[in-house]
Image (spheres, rainbow, N blue to C red):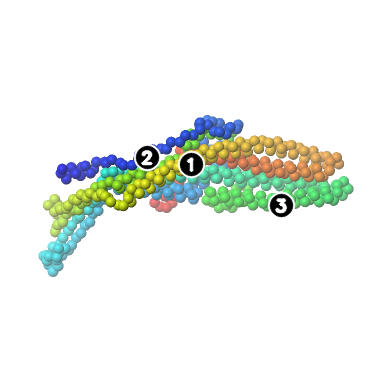
Amino acid sequence: MGLASTILLGLLPGCMVGPDPTPPAVVVADAWHEDLVEGLSRAEVDPGAWWRAFDDPILVDLVATAERNNFDLRTAASRIREARSLYGIAAADLYPEINANGEAEFLDGNQANSSGLPVSDQNFYSLDLDFGWEIDLWGKVRRGMQAAEFDLQAQIEDARDILVTIRAEVARSYIEARSLQGQVEALRRIVAAQAETVTLAKAQFRQGVVTEFSLLQAQAQLQAFEAKVPSLEYELAAAVNRLSVLIAEPGGPLQDRLASTAGELGVPDPPKEIAVGIPADVIRRRPDIRAAERQVGAAAANIGVAEAALYPSLRLSGQGGYSSTQFDRLVNPSNLGGLLAIEVSWPIFTAGRLRSVVDVRNEQAYQALMSYEATVVGAIADVETALVAYGSSLREQTRLRQVVDTYDRAATLATSRLEQGVDDLESLLDLERELLAAVQDLAVVDGQVAANAVGIYKALGGSWKIEENTIDATATAVMMEDGR
């Protein structure tokens, strides 16, 4: 076999040892176990920009700001670029490595050339090329490329998962802030009503209608209500500050913005209908499941890398170039010289080290598979829990609205009867306490209903096209800022 034939065989792709990465299969139920409440449907999941369905312009703006500024998302974009570069490193091993070296010597008669021989006045020029190429006979490089590609895809899915989480956390923090604003406002209305009750009690005490004990009781209840306001205001400030961290902007302007719109925008109402699909939709859409699937593929590809190390390797190396005493005649066929070497290496005895590496890769692939299955089970449980939470909060909201309405009508009636001298002050105070508790509970539950709707969207996994565009835009923006 001639030298040209040997090189030609080396250029042909060899076989690839190790298992071919295939998507793992899991069996899930055909429908959700939880009965769907009104407002939830089994239609195919396609949430799109779900936060827009809450019909709150500030929420939409906050999500867009977080997509631009959030530090975790910017870090995720950097990890994607890193993974792409690592793939490029792995792919480079598929090609030969070539290095060029040039040299020029300027000599006179009193000097020797590089061989140590005296020469007359003349110059010496050389241009050398060195190359080395390990032929990928068993697919070691190609399996490494597969692993690097799966790692890249996993990083993209991780970035999507971060984006899904950021959007959900922005919405939840915003809803929490609006809920706390509603609680503070409700408490202040109750305080104002209680202050009127104290004024009425003072007037009736002077008239001898109520006792001093009843007056003191009314004053104490007013003071207790007033004492609750600072605590709620602190919780509100903390919620706004958490939101400011998510959008990576100072908290002060955000607090002013939310305060100035508190009267016109309360807790955003969730959409009238949310499509939850079937469990199979979750496996297809959730980025954490998709990332775990890619990690299984990378682990399988790494088995092939380890197995390829058990077999012989073939490496071509060469050195050659041109040399001349005249620069204008340097690149001339008559001045060309060099050599080509073929090296075969086979690890015959390594005391089981290479076989142990294969065993390690097999166990890592098994662990990746177990992690994938656990992620699927956890994702299904997340959706089931989100459905239960949403349905429970929705039923509680309906009942609390009835309770608040009943207590409000009862308190109005009790105030009128007290003014007429029919009922005592204690009855009105009891009703006002119950009304306050119900109003605050309703404000909390209003926030929980909206937050639980967000939880459903998060558990279902988000919208891919929007997320891909956002991730790419974020990565590009960061590169432009860095001057790359």
Helix or strand or loop: what does disc 3 sit on?
helix
Which label was assigned to residue 335? none
Seen as rendered, the residue at the extreme front is 351
Type of amino acid under label 2: Pro
Q: Residue at x 40, y 46 (%)?
A: 364
Q: Residue at x 76, y 49 (%)?
A: 221
Type of amino acid under label 1: Ala
Residue holding disc 1: 374
Q: Percent position (x, y) of residue 483?
A: 40, 52
Which label was assigned to residue 227? 3
Q: Nearer the viewer, mark 2 or mark 3?
A: 2
Q: Percent position (x, y) of residue 211?
A: 86, 49
- Pick whichever, 177 or 383, lies toward us: 383
Q: Is residue 289 left or right of residue 333?
A: right
Asked if residue 61 can be seen in this view, the reply is no
- Pick whichever, 25 or 396, lies toward us: 25
